[in-house]
Amino acid sequence: MFKISRNLNEMKYNGESIKLAIIGAGKMGASLISQLSNIDAMEVKLVIDRTPQKAIDALKKAGIPEERIIYTDDYNEGYEVLEKGYVCVSTNYRLSYKLLQINAVIDCTGNPSFGAVIARKTIQYHKHMISFNVECEATVGPVLHDMAKKAGVVYTGILGDEPGAIIDLCDQAFGMGLDVLVAAKGKNNKLDEYATPETLKEEAKGKSLSAKMLTSFVDGTNTMLELNSVCNALGFLPDTFGCHGIDTSPETAVEDFKLKREGGILDNYKIVEFSKGMAPGVFIIATSDKEDVRDLMKFLGFGDGPNYLMYRPYHLTSLEAPITIYNAVVENEPTIAPIQGQVADTITIAKRDIKAGESLDGIGSEKVYGKLTSHTRSMNEDLLPIGLITPKTVATCDIPKDTLIEMNMVEIDERATITRLRRRQNSMKL
């Protein structure tokens, strides 16, 4: 971390900076804007939002004087705004990747279909793509990662989200020569797979979240998508459909997450999991087959082994994102990337009866939720990844409640960027 601070300070001294475009000025985007205002050589130069006033308010809260904020949707004017040292606000997302001054684009939308558009174009314009959009990454991340490698840029998730924080722990374990058996996250909310935006409306208002976003947390879809991202980075799978999701604690996790023949609940190791009892942190179970390592781990207070808990009792969302930004832009290193390909899929299940002709609405809706399974199963049974649902996705037959929705039960938007990327990804066997 001292290296990051030292190098950014040197960049500032030399009159250099990382110039950023942020898309989405909601809770995550606004907090990121404020955080970046405290960091040397990182400048928010462009904020995109459907509601320009939200972007302006976020910049003002971060200490940017209103007279230095200029709204425009025009490329030429936007270029001049940035050249003169002002900050641009726009509803035109194309400016984020077209403006020459921008080094990296940050997607804070959480909208998978829109995120696919942003990521593809950003990479094509040879800019780094930093994504809070795990919904997009879990669906088409491998093909976007492949495109980014070929373009010489980075496509990455952030350290502050649970997937990035899990990978950070795994990096520590791998760096020490340990073998990771379980990669897991705490779940911050109750689990109710049939939760709806209507039933959570008041709770969402109290948390300053959209009802759809809170619904995706409570019905488990967000957890599944985050673990999907970890699967694609590590090559792990859920031990059972949708994971076990048991309650555990730092005191009992090592015993709970053993193989069944060892007194635990697992059929396999190299798996992803979640547990409400570990929220808001992330954790891994690691092991070593070396006697001297086990002796030292016992001496250091990690227990008798052979399995050990490494626990990070927090994740700090946008507050840790600057670390990812630095590593992507300066070191050309992702925090988390789907280097193993599409190992798992978060497939779609009906929350209620859906009639032929109804739209599915997608993540955080009152109609469907997502559950994690292997990509092999998803392909063999032709199941619908929930991230592929767009406003144009329509049921072509009656779909009973609790049905695992197959691709032939719906009409998806074949013209959508996310659909075309997924088709390409499948054809490339990524």
Image: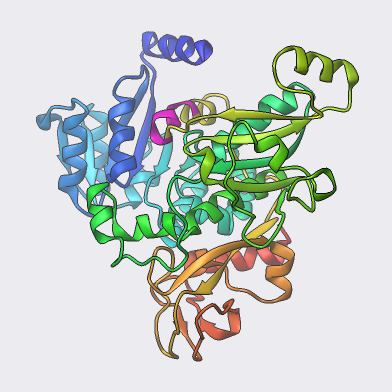
- Nearer the observer, 126 or 405: 405
In this picture, residue 386 sits left or right of residue 19? right
Outermost residue on the left side: it is 67
- Nearer the observer, 402 or 71: 402
Q: Magenta stretch: residue 246 in it?
A: no
Q: Quadrant of the C terminus?
A: bottom right
Residue 406, picture quadrant: bottom right
- Residue 200: give x, y in percent of width and height: 30, 60
Up/down of 209 relative to 169, above or below:
below
The answer to whether residue 77 shows anywhere in this view is no
Up/down of 231 relative to 82, above or below:
below
**Residue for point 79% across, 27% down:** 305
Q: Which residues are magenta?
A: 317-323
Up/down of 27 relative to 6, above or below:
below
- Residue 173: give x, y in percent of width and height: 71, 27
**Residue for point 55% across, 34% down:** 165
Residue 393, picture quadrant: bottom left
- Residue 160: give x, y in percent of width and height: 47, 34
